Image (cartoon, rainbow, N blue to C red):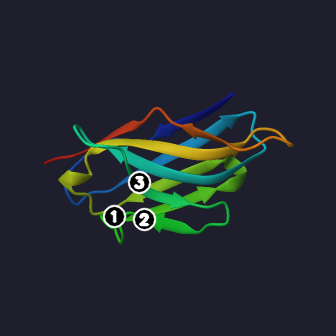
Amino acid sequence: QVQLVESGGGLVQPGGSLRLSCAASGSIIATYAMGWYRQAPGKQRELVATITRGGSTNYADSVKGRFTISRDNPKNTVYLQMNSLKPEDTAVYYCNADVLRALGTTRANYWGQGTQVTVAS
Protein backbone atom coordinates (compact mmCIF):
# COMPACT_ATOMS: atom_id res chain seq x y z
CA GLN A 1 0.00 0.00 0.00
CA VAL A 2 1.13 3.56 -0.71
CA GLN A 3 0.24 6.62 1.34
CA LEU A 4 0.78 10.29 0.60
CA VAL A 5 0.89 12.41 3.73
CA GLU A 6 0.72 16.19 3.43
CA SER A 7 1.78 18.71 6.05
CA GLY A 8 2.40 22.43 6.38
CA GLY A 9 -1.03 23.92 5.83
CA GLY A 10 -2.54 26.53 8.09
CA LEU A 11 -3.76 30.10 8.46
CA VAL A 12 -1.63 32.90 7.07
CA GLN A 13 -2.14 36.60 6.41
CA PRO A 14 -2.21 37.98 2.87
CA GLY A 15 1.33 38.44 1.63
CA GLY A 16 2.62 35.68 3.87
CA SER A 17 4.27 32.37 3.08
CA LEU A 18 3.72 28.70 3.72
CA ARG A 19 5.61 25.56 2.75
CA LEU A 20 3.71 22.35 2.08
CA SER A 21 5.34 18.95 2.17
CA CYS A 22 4.08 15.59 0.91
CA ALA A 23 5.86 12.35 1.65
CA ALA A 24 5.04 9.11 -0.13
CA SER A 25 5.49 5.99 1.97
CA GLY A 26 4.92 2.27 1.65
CA SER A 27 6.09 -0.26 -0.88
CA ILE A 28 7.70 2.08 -3.42
CA ILE A 29 10.31 1.42 -6.07
CA ALA A 30 10.24 5.00 -7.38
CA THR A 31 8.02 8.05 -7.66
CA TYR A 32 7.57 9.74 -11.01
CA ALA A 33 5.45 12.81 -11.73
CA MET A 34 4.36 14.53 -8.52
CA GLY A 35 2.18 17.54 -8.08
CA TRP A 36 -0.10 19.76 -6.08
CA TYR A 37 -3.75 20.46 -6.78
CA ARG A 38 -6.24 22.56 -4.86
CA GLN A 39 -9.97 22.77 -4.39
CA ALA A 40 -11.77 25.82 -3.04
CA PRO A 41 -15.33 25.62 -1.68
CA GLY A 42 -17.83 25.32 -4.50
CA LYS A 43 -15.12 24.95 -7.15
CA GLN A 44 -13.55 22.08 -9.05
CA ARG A 45 -10.16 20.73 -8.14
CA GLU A 46 -7.47 22.50 -10.17
CA LEU A 47 -3.81 21.98 -10.93
CA VAL A 48 -1.37 24.15 -9.00
CA ALA A 49 2.01 22.76 -10.02
CA THR A 50 3.66 19.55 -11.17
CA ILE A 51 7.23 18.29 -11.31
CA THR A 52 8.73 15.35 -13.17
CA ARG A 53 11.27 12.98 -11.69
CA GLY A 54 13.92 14.85 -13.64
CA GLY A 55 12.83 18.21 -12.23
CA SER A 56 10.83 19.75 -15.05
CA THR A 57 8.08 21.93 -13.65
CA ASN A 58 4.70 23.25 -14.72
CA TYR A 59 2.61 25.90 -12.96
CA ALA A 60 -0.89 27.28 -13.16
CA ASP A 61 -0.83 30.85 -14.45
CA SER A 62 -2.39 32.06 -11.21
CA VAL A 63 0.62 30.97 -9.12
CA LYS A 64 3.54 31.58 -11.49
CA GLY A 65 6.20 33.71 -9.86
CA ARG A 66 4.77 33.13 -6.36
CA PHE A 67 4.87 29.34 -5.84
CA THR A 68 7.80 26.99 -6.29
CA ILE A 69 7.54 23.21 -6.50
CA SER A 70 10.52 21.00 -5.70
CA ARG A 71 11.20 17.40 -4.79
CA ASP A 72 13.62 15.06 -3.03
CA ASN A 73 13.66 11.78 -4.96
CA PRO A 74 15.45 9.62 -2.35
CA LYS A 75 12.84 10.73 0.20
CA ASN A 76 9.90 10.40 -2.22
CA THR A 77 8.85 13.87 -1.08
CA VAL A 78 7.48 16.88 -2.93
CA TYR A 79 7.34 20.43 -1.60
CA LEU A 80 5.38 23.56 -2.47
CA GLN A 81 6.80 26.88 -1.34
CA MET A 82 4.02 29.46 -1.45
CA ASN A 83 4.93 33.14 -1.22
CA SER A 84 2.91 36.33 -1.57
CA LEU A 85 -0.22 34.44 -0.67
CA LYS A 86 -3.59 35.91 -1.58
CA PRO A 87 -7.07 35.25 -0.18
CA GLU A 88 -7.95 33.52 -3.45
CA ASP A 89 -5.28 30.91 -2.70
CA THR A 90 -7.50 29.64 0.12
CA ALA A 91 -8.30 25.98 -0.59
CA VAL A 92 -7.63 22.41 0.39
CA TYR A 93 -4.32 21.45 -1.21
CA TYR A 94 -3.88 17.87 -2.39
CA CYS A 95 -0.70 16.02 -3.23
CA ASN A 96 -0.64 13.66 -6.21
CA ALA A 97 1.99 11.17 -7.33
CA ASP A 98 2.63 8.48 -9.91
CA VAL A 99 4.25 5.57 -8.10
CA LEU A 100 5.95 2.39 -9.22
CA ARG A 101 5.35 -0.19 -6.51
CA ALA A 102 7.17 -3.17 -7.96
CA LEU A 103 9.34 -4.08 -10.93
CA GLY A 104 7.37 -5.45 -13.84
CA THR A 105 4.23 -3.56 -12.90
CA THR A 106 2.75 -0.33 -14.17
CA ARG A 107 2.69 2.96 -12.33
CA ALA A 108 -0.32 3.82 -10.22
CA ASN A 109 -1.65 7.25 -9.28
CA TYR A 110 -2.25 8.26 -5.68
CA TRP A 111 -3.78 11.22 -3.84
CA GLY A 112 -3.11 12.57 -0.38
CA GLN A 113 -5.85 13.42 2.08
CA GLY A 114 -5.45 17.17 1.65
CA THR A 115 -4.29 20.01 3.84
CA GLN A 116 -6.18 23.26 4.42
CA VAL A 117 -4.58 26.56 3.48
CA THR A 118 -6.44 29.68 4.57
CA VAL A 119 -5.26 33.16 3.63
CA ALA A 120 -7.05 35.83 5.66
CA SER A 121 -6.29 38.89 7.72
Query: Residue visible at 58% across and 38% down?
Result: 110
> Nearer the N terminus, badge 2 or badge 3?
3
Q: Distance between the residues labelled 1 and 2?
A: 7 Å
Q: What element carries label 2?
A: strand
Q: How far apart are marks 1 and 3 (CA)?
A: 10 Å
Q: In this view, does 89 lie above or below 27?
A: below
Q: Which amino acid does label 3 sit on?
A: Leu
Q: Around disc 1, counting alpha carbons within 10 Å, would you say few (fewer than 14), some (14 to 19), or many (20 or more)?
A: some
Q: Do the residues labelled 1 and 2 touch (CB within 8 Å)?
A: yes
- Image check: 38 left or right of 84? right
Q: Which amino acid does label 1 sit on?
A: Val
> Nearer the N terminus, badge 1 or badge 3?
3
Asked if residue 8 shows in the view, the reply is no
Residue annotated with mark 1: 63
Residue annotated with mark 2: 59
Residue annotated with mark 3: 47
Where, by quadrant of the figure, is residue 52 drawn?
bottom right
